[in-house]
Image (cartoon, coloured by chain):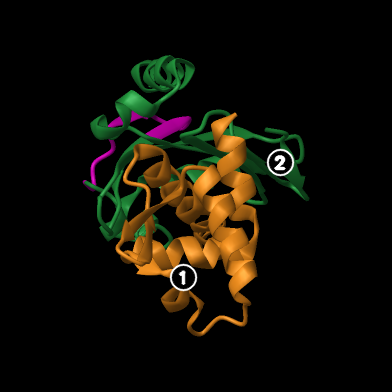
Chain colours: A green, B orange
């Protein structure tokens, strides 16, 4: 698929099962990190009920944090979202969101590349 | 490219509505048309695109044809992708509002 660039947002579908979004935010990376990693802040924009568990499944302080998510509707597909924060060129932060399905029931449908990439990213975190 | 077919099939707002209706349960074409300003031939056309993308399948019961979401995982993935493609941009709006409130 071609990348779609909408203003400062980029939506890229790398694999059939991975969604990747990039946003340039005005706030500095440290502030964005607090908003995604401190539960009291996180709950204000990412509903607690959308996470499978409040604790991250992986974290690299200041840079990257991953949470398991669980859908509300049948078949309750399981997924992992990874947030990566880096400084951007204008003093703000670039937030990259990588959201991929990890549901074991889908394994037989996933392209091999999606499998290896997804797993590597999560193991590296 | 299967995912390209899926996104093409769901890029049309009418087909997206049809797919979401079927996600709630199997239906025949006339039940699907209820509440939608759409002709019967147009509905058939949309259903055929969804069927070719393997998002829905038809099941004949005597003289009637019911349509349902293809239980194959590809349809599940398509539904999931459609939902979360809209989900994150909406969450980011909330995040931006929160960032304004947090002291740097």
Query: For residue A47, which quarter of the picture?
Result: bottom left
Chain letter of disc 1 in the image: B
Number of callouts in the render?
2
Q: Nearer the viewer, residue A74 or A94?
A: A74
Q: Is A94 placed above or below B91 here?
A: above
Q: Answer yes or no: is residue A59 visible.
A: yes
Disc 1 with disc 2 on a shared chain: no
Marks 1, 2: nearer the viewer: 1
Q: Nearer the viewer, residue A89 or A20?
A: A20
User: Is B9 on the left or on the right of A61, as rendered?
Assistant: right
Q: Residues within 10 Å of mark 2 (few under 14, many from 20)?
A: few
Percent x, y for residue B57? 41, 50
Q: Is B102 placed above or below B74 here?
A: below
The answer to whether residue A55 is magenta is yes
- Residue range in magenta is A53-65
SS for callout 1: helix
Percent x, y for residue A76? 25, 50
Q: Nearer the viewer, residue B44 or B64?
A: B64
Tell me the residue that label 1 is attached to.
B29
Tell me the residue that label 2 is attached to.
A91
Q: Nearer the viewer, residue B64 or B26?
A: B64
Q: Answer yes or no: is residue B102 visible.
A: no
User: Is A105 on the left or on the right of B53, as rendered?
Assistant: left
Main SS type for the magenta part?
Answer: loop
SS for callout 2: loop
């Amino acid at each position: 698929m071609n990348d779609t660039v909408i203003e400062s947002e980029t939506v890229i579908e790398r694999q059939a099962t991975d969604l990747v979004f990039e946003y340039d935010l005005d706030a500095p990376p440290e502030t964005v990190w607090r908003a995604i990693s401190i539960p009291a802040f996180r709950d204000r924009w990412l509903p607690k009920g959308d996470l499978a568990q409040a604790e991250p499944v992986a974290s690299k302080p200041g840079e990257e944090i991953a949470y398991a998510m669980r859908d509300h509707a049948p078949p309750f597909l399981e997924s992992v979202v990874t947030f990566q924060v880096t400084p951007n060129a204008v003093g703000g932060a670039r937030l990259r969101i990588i959201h991929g399905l990890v549901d074991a029931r889908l394994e037989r449908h996933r392209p091999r590349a999606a499998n290896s990439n997804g797993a590597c990213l999560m193991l590296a975190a | 490219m299967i995912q390209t077919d899926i996104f093409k099939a769901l890029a049309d707002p009418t087909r997206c509505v049809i797919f979401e209706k079927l996600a709630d349960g199997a239906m025949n074409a006339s039940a699907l048309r209820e509440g939608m300003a759409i002709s019967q031939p147009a509905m058939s056309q949309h259903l055929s695109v969804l069927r070719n993308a393997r998002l829905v399948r038809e099941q004949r019961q005597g003289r009637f044809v019911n349509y349902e979401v293809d239980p194959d995982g590809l349809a599940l993935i398509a539904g999931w992708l459609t939902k979360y493609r809209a989900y994150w941009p909406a969450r980011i709006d909330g995040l931006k509002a929160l960032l304004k409130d947090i002291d740097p």
